[in-house]
Amino acid sequence: MNFLKRQTYMDYIWWQKGIIYQVYPRSFQDSNGDGIGDLQGIINRLDYFEWLGIDAIWISPIYPSPMADFGYDISDYKDIHPIFGNMDDFDKLIKEVHERGLKLILDLVPNHTSEEHLWFKESRSSRTSSKRDWYLWKDPSHDGGPPNNWLSVFGGSAWQWDENTSQYYYHAYLKEQPDLNWRNIEVQKAMFEVMHFWLDKGVDGFRVDVMWHMIKDEKWRNNPANPDHKEGMSPYNSLIPSYSVDQPEVHEVVAKMRSVVNKYDDRVIIGEIYLPIHQLVTYYGMAQQGAHLPFNFHLITLPWDAREIALAIDQYEGALPDQSWPNWVLGNHDKPRIASRAGLEQIKVAAILLLTLRGTPTLYYGDEIGMQNVNITTKEAQDPWEKNVPGIGLGRDPVRTPMQWDNTENGGFSTGKPWLPLPENYKTVNVKKQQEDPSSTLSLYQRLISIRRKEKALHVGSYVPIPQEGDLLAYIRKAEGASLLIILNFGSKPASFRSEQVKLKGKILVASDLSKEGQETEEIIAIGGNEGLVIKII
Ligand code: GLC
Ligand code: CA
C-alpha cells in the first residue's frame, strides 16, 4: 500500500464522513417501566436518530454486570444484561439499525473484568490456577504493604489484598474491576474471540474502554509525585501515572485488535484515551494500524476559551500522522456537560464548532437539547466514584440523567421511577418542544448535521485556520472549489470580523441566530456575542 497516496472522495468511509451519537443505555429510553433504559427503548427511538441525521450509535456497555461501575464491570462479555433485555432484543436492534442505514458501535472493556467474571473467580481460587496469570497478582512489598504506590482512579490504593491466596491484585478502577494481564497471550486470544463474536453479529465497531491503561510497566516501578497537585483535586492526580499507563507495548496490543477488525469490512476501532495531543496521536499506530479514531477529548478537557481551543486545533492538525483521520468529542458519560461547562449561552457556538471542525464528531445524548449537569443529592448518588471520593465534584451522576423527551411525566423517559432524577426543567427543555421550535438548539443541530452531510467541504474538506484575537475563532473548510467560513464568538460582546486572508463575500448557511440564515455577507462581518456563523463564500 502506498501511504503517501492522497485519499479521493470515494475512499472516505462512514466513520470518517459520519457523525457518532453516544447513547448511555440506562438513561435513554425505558420501555418496561422499571425506571432504567433498555434495548427496546433504543429501538423505540430509532426514528429520532434518522430525523437528527446522525450516522452511528455507540452504546455504553449492555453486558451482564454486577453494576459496581454501571456496566463497565463485565461478568460475561458475550451476553446481554437482563435489565437491558436479551440477545433477541439485541439482534432486533442491530437489524433495525442497519435497515435504516445506521451503524452500531459497542463498548468493549478489555482492560478489566468484573470480580464476578468466571475468569477472575478461577484466577483468585488458588496460586496455581490455570488463570492465575490472567490477572495482575503480586506479593506484598518488603514492609508488607501494597507492591507499589499506584493509585486507583476511583480513590485509594490500586492494590487489593486477597486473604485466600495472600497476594495483592491490581485494579486501576474499583476493586470490583480487576485488571487483566494483557501480556498474557491467552488473555489476548480470549478477548479477540469476544470481538469476533460481536463482529460476526454485524456490529460496526468498538469503542475501546481505557485503551491507554491496557499495559503496565513490566518492572512495576513507583509513579512519581505530581508537583502540581492541589487540594480539591482528585487524589488519583497526586501521582503522575508514568508507569501505570501509556506504556510502549500497548501499541502492539492495539495493533492486534486492529488486525481482528481488519478481517471484516469497514469496521471501526475507537480508543478512549485521555492523553496530551502528541501522545494521543501515537495510538493511530505504525502505518495507521492502530485505532482508527483515538478519541480526541481536548474540547472536553480544555477551558472553554477561544485562544486555548484555537491552539489545540492547530496542534492537533499539525500532529496528525499522514493518512490518519481526526475526530472531536464534546461530551460523554464521564465529564461535565457542555451546557454547564461552557454555559447555556455558548451551547450553539459549541454545536457549530463540533460539527464544522475537520474529523468525525461524537455527540453525547442530551447535549443536542442543552441538557445541563443535574444536581444529585448525596442520598440519590449512584456513581461509585462520588461514593468513594465524595464532595469534590468527581461524581458522574449529574451527566447521566434520563433523556428529556417531552413534558409528560418523567420527560417521556419512563412510566416508573427513573434510576436518576430528571431536573425540573424537563417540561421546557425537551426534544419534542425543541423539534417544534426552529430557533432551538436541537433544530440548529439538525440543520447543521444536514448541511454537514451535503457539503463536502464540511465532512471531508481541508482545514485552514484564520488567526484571530480575543474571543473569536475562525477557520475555512474547503473541498472541490467550495469554501466555507466559520466564525465563532466565545465571548458575550459583539465583534466585527475582517480578514486580509479570505474573501468574505458570501451567504450565511447556518447561524446560531436563525434570522441571519440566508443573509449575504460583505467585507466586514458583524457577529453578535455568543454567536456562530457558517458562511458559504461565493
Ligand atoms: C472509562 C469509562 C468509565 C468507566 C471507566 C472504568 O473511563 O468511560 O465510565 O468508569 O472506564 O471502566
Ligand atoms: Ca427498562
Image: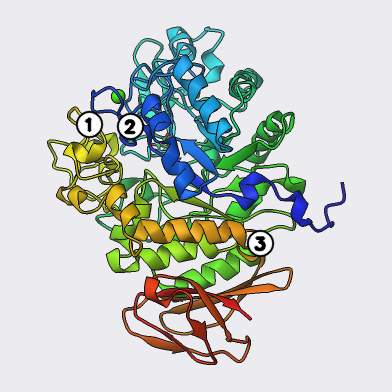
Q: Are marks 2 and 1 in contact (CB under 8 Å)?
A: yes
Q: Residue at x 66, y 40 (%)?
A: 251
Q: Nearer the viewer, residue 143 or 8?
A: 8
Q: Give residue 419's mark.
A: 1
Relative side of 429 to 250, left or right: left
Res. 143 in view: no
Q: Earlier in the sequence, mark 2 or mark 1?
A: 2
Secondary element at image label 1: loop
Q: In this orientation, which residue lies closer to the viewer: 254 or 530?
A: 530
Q: Quadrant of ligand 1?
A: top left
Q: Please tell me whether mark 3 sits on a helix, a strand or a loop.
A: helix
Badge 1 density bin: few <14, some 14–19, many ≥20, Cα 10 Å: some
- Tell which of 66 and 530 is nearer to you: 530
Give the Cα distance between marks 2 and 1. Answer: 8 Å
Viewed as shown, does residue 201 lie left or right of 209? right
**Of the image marks 1 and 3, the number of the one nearer the N terminus:** 1
Q: Which residue is mark 3?
A: 456
- Crowding at mark 3 (Cα within 10 Å: few <14, some 14-19, many 20+): some
The residues bearing labels 2 and 3 have C-alpha atoms spaced at a distance of 35 Å
Disc 3 marks which amino acid? Lys
CA distance for labels 1 and 3: 42 Å
What amino acid type is highlighted by mark number 1? Trp
Point out residue 497 in the picture as x, y percentages from the top left corner: 48, 87
Place of residue 419 in the rendered image (x, y in percent of width and height, measured from the top left)? 22, 31
**Residue type indicated by callout 2:** Arg
Element class at badge 2 = helix
Circle 2 or circle 3, nearest the eye: 3
The answer to the question of whether label 2 and label 3 lie on touching residues, with beta carbons closer than 8 A, is no
The quarter of the displayed image where residue 85 is located: top left
Question: Residue 421 lies in what quarter of the image?
Answer: top left
Residue for badge 2: 26
Tell me if residue 9 comes above or below residue 377 in the rendering. below
